[in-house]
Image: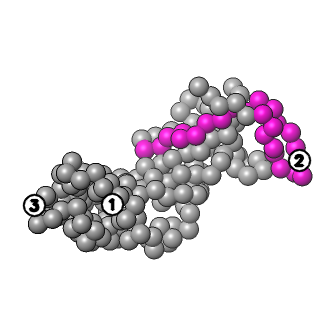
Amino acid sequence: MSKAIIKLTYKQVIDALSTTDFEKNVLFASYQEFLLKSQAYNPGNRLKTFSEMKNNDGRSNSLHYKLSFAIGYFIETLKNKIPVLTDNLGNSITFEVPKFELIESDITTIEEHKIALNYITGELTLLNTIGEYLVLTAGNGEETFTVKMQDGLSISSYQEINNVTALNNHDVFSQLKVAK
């Protein structure tokens, strides 16, 4: 197997059935912001759901972005650790970019509010796959870790490595080939 530079994305879906304090806080804060910000796309409150708002006014898709500000504090408390994903030894996986997604909501009840947080890692080196396990390394490659592929986890970026050279004790990938 060829080595590759990859990024992982883990999608955490949060809804009324979520149980942790983090999830409950994110759900409540994003719902309150939805009630406020959705008014611009719902004149007269005649529309009830986010889907209806999108069908009526495409600009309502900006709610994904607008609602993300309401949960910024809670994302910061994670200290760039994905809260629901660990390696096989129980160590947290670090993310670089969180992306907020409003899946559905309803102005009449929080029980229909459903969002997703997509945690995107920095670049990792994929050294090998063993069944459903990824053998990875980060940074200069001194330590490896193993992650099991699972629901919600995806390889969101993949570049095969053809030639690796060392420069200042760092791996420099002089030739990258995008996998097809």
Q: Which residue is mark 2?
A: 167
Task: Farthest residue to the bottom: give it.
Answer: 73
Tell me how many marks there are. 3
Evaluate whether residue 24 shows in this view.
no
Q: Secondary structure at mark 2?
A: strand
Q: Which residue is mark 3?
A: 46
Q: Which residue is mark 1?
A: 63
Tell me the residue at 13%/58% (across/down).
47
Instruction: Answer few, some or many: residues within 10 Å of disc 3's Cα (few below 14, many 20 plus, some between 14 and 19).
Output: few
Task: Farthest residue to the right: give it.
Answer: 168
Instruction: Answer few, some or many: residues within 10 Å of disc 2's Cα (few below 14, many 20 plus, some between 14 and 19).
Output: few
Magenta extent:
152-175
Q: Earlier in the sequence, mark 1 or mark 3?
A: 3
Secondary structure predominantly adopted by residues drawn in magenta: strand
Q: CA distance from mark 1 to mark 3?
A: 18 Å
Q: Which amino acid type is marked by label 3?
A: Arg
**175 is higher (above) or lower (below) than 96:** above
> Residue 23 location in percent, x, y?
36, 64
Residue 17 lies in quadrant:
bottom left
68 relative position to 137: left or right: left
Q: Is residue 155 magenta?
A: yes
> Quick one: quadrant of the N terminus?
top right
Q: Earlier in the sequence, mark 2 or mark 3?
A: 3
